[in-house]
């Protein structure tokens, strides 16, 4: 993989991965989503091989000398990747990120250490509005290059598909700028990228005394323009006290649905604000955060197809209460995990860390957390038919670990870099050329 002018030049090749200790999260047949107890069973195959043809998994099985020789005889030009006793996982899927942003917000981190709350920082001009000021004055090319470097970092840490939100522009020019950057990333990236419009991230200063006017602007002007330009597949809303109510959220999401965008919701993060109910009412594909979800919310989510997505990096970084992960699993819900990579509340795009935190903080088992970060996260952005497991026919986005004693060692050893190689569509990923 070479880089010219900071672009990936990507070549899909046929590849044989062999000498593995274990293939993790294998499927004999495609499964769109895993719910409740099903998430506790993680299928594996010891001493496995994977045959990748034209970027997709063509075959996998237990390695024998005879089968490896047959493959080499049949495909004489095939590349061979020796896993050296490592494990092979399907790439992580990060279904909730905000990686197009300008600058950092470490001073707010210090302010929280000194005792200020998230809302206190927001009312002092920090938080989302801090990022808005910076992004509006940042050129599009600069936003692209910084986000591109963040994506490269995420890929190196095992992410093989990603969602990216707007939401730091909050006016026509800047929101469209963000969405154009996301489109540029999608056109050049070696992994699938989903775009989400998050104009309802906060009320901008110019509408500070006129929230209703801002909602009319979103629903009557900006959403139709985004739909016309086909810049976003999803529309998200921050349903939270001081931001947007559940009724506001319904209005915005229904307007977006009318212009071809699928609803998502930031729900029940800082308080219980009715975001889950609004998401269910609007047919959301996912509701995310959920620290303040209650038993009624869990009941509402059952059998809806809406995927509860937990963001342990943000919850840990802000010191919030834990979402009711085990209650959701016991109720048979299909949990997903994501990083929420953003400059204010989760400045980290490491999905392996998100998996570890889910085990440590929420008492999710390694099996549950791995499935939540692969198949279920892929389902939360409409990609589970193509990504999220080792299954014949799926795109071969994988990572190979260093030799480890078990797959549970990955979340257990949360501070150690265990991923040795990244495979994307049958090619070894090497990032930017030097």
Image: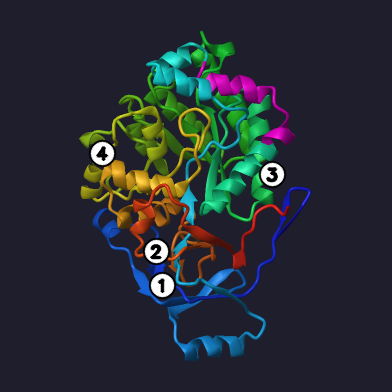
Label 4 element class: loop
Task: Kindly identify which residue carries mark 2.
Answer: 404
Checking the image for residue 21, the label placed there is 1
| Mark 4 surroundings: few (<14), some (14-19) or many (≥20) residues within 10 A | some
Residue at 68%, 32% in the rendered image = 177
Q: Along the polypeptide, which appears first: circle 3 or circle 4?
A: 3
Label 4, label 2: how many angstroms apart (C-alpha)?
31 Å
371 up-or-down from 101: above or below: below
Q: Along the polypeptide, which appears first: circle 2 or circle 3?
A: 3
| Mark 1 surroundings: few (<14), some (14-19) or many (≥20) residues within 10 A | many
Label 1 element class: loop
**Looking at the image, do the residues carrying marks 2 and 3 touch, with CB atoms under 8 Å apart?**
no
Q: Quadrant of residue 182?
A: top right
Q: Position of residue 397 (x, y in %)?
A: 53, 62
**Looking at the image, do the residues carrying marks 1 and 2 touch, with CB atoms under 8 Å apart?**
yes
What segment carries the magenta color? 126-143
Task: Kindly identify which residue carries mark 4.
Answer: 324
């Amino acid at each position: 993989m070479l880089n010219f002018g900071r672009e990936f030049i990507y070549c899909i090749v046929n590849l044989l991965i062999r000498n593995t200790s274990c293939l993790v999260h294998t499927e004999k047949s495609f499964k769109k989503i895993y719910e409740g107890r099903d998430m506790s069973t993680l299928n594996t195959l010891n001493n496995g091989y994977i045959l990748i043809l034209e970027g997709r998994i063509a075959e996998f099985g237990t390695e024998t000398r005879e089968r490896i020789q047959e493959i080499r005889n049949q495909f004489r030009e095939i590349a061979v990747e020796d896993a050296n006793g490592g494990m092979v996982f399907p790439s992580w899927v990060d279904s909730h990120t905000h990686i197009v942003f300008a600058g950092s917000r470490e001073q707010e981190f210090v302010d929280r250490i000194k005792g200020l709350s998230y809302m206190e920082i927001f009312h002092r001009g920090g938080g989302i509005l801090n990022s808005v000021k910076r992004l509006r004055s940042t050129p599009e090319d600069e936003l692209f290059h910084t986000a591109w470097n963040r994506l490269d970092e995420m890929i190196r840490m095992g992410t093989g598909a990603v969602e990216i939100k707007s939401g730091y522009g909050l006016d026509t020019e800047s929101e469209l700028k963000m969405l154009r950057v996301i489109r540029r990333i999608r056109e050049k990236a070696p992994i699938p990228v989903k775009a989400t419009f998050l104009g309802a991230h906060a009320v901008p200063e110019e509408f500070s005394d006129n929230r209703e006017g801002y909602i009319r602007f979103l629903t009557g002007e900006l959403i139709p323009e985004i739909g016309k330009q086909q810049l976003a597949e999803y529309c998200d809303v921050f349903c939270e006290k001081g931001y947007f109510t559940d009724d506001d959220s319904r209005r915005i999401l229904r307007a977006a649905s009318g212009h071809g965008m699928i609803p998502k919701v930031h729900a029940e993060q800082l308080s219980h604000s009715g975001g889950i109910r609004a998401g269910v009412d609007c047919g959301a594909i996912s509701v995310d955060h959920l620290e303040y979800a209650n038993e009624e919310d869990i009941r509402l989510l059952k059998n809806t197809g809406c995927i509860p997505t937990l963001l342990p990096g943000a919850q840990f970084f802000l010191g919030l209460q834990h979402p009711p992960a085990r209650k959701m699993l016991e109720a048979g819900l299909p949990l997903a995990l994501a990083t929420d990579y953003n400059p204010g509340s989760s400045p980290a795009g490491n999905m392996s860390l998100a998996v570890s935190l889910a085990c440590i903080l929420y008492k999710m088992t390694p099996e549950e957390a791995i499935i939540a970060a692969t198949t279920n996260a892929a389902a939360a952005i409409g990609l589970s038919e193509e990504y999220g497991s080792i299954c014949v026919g799926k795109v071969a986005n994988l990572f190979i670990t260093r030799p480890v004693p078990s797959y549970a060692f990955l979340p257990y050893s949360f501070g150690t870099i265990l991923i040795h190689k990244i495979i994307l569509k049958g090619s070894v990923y090497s990032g930017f050329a030097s």
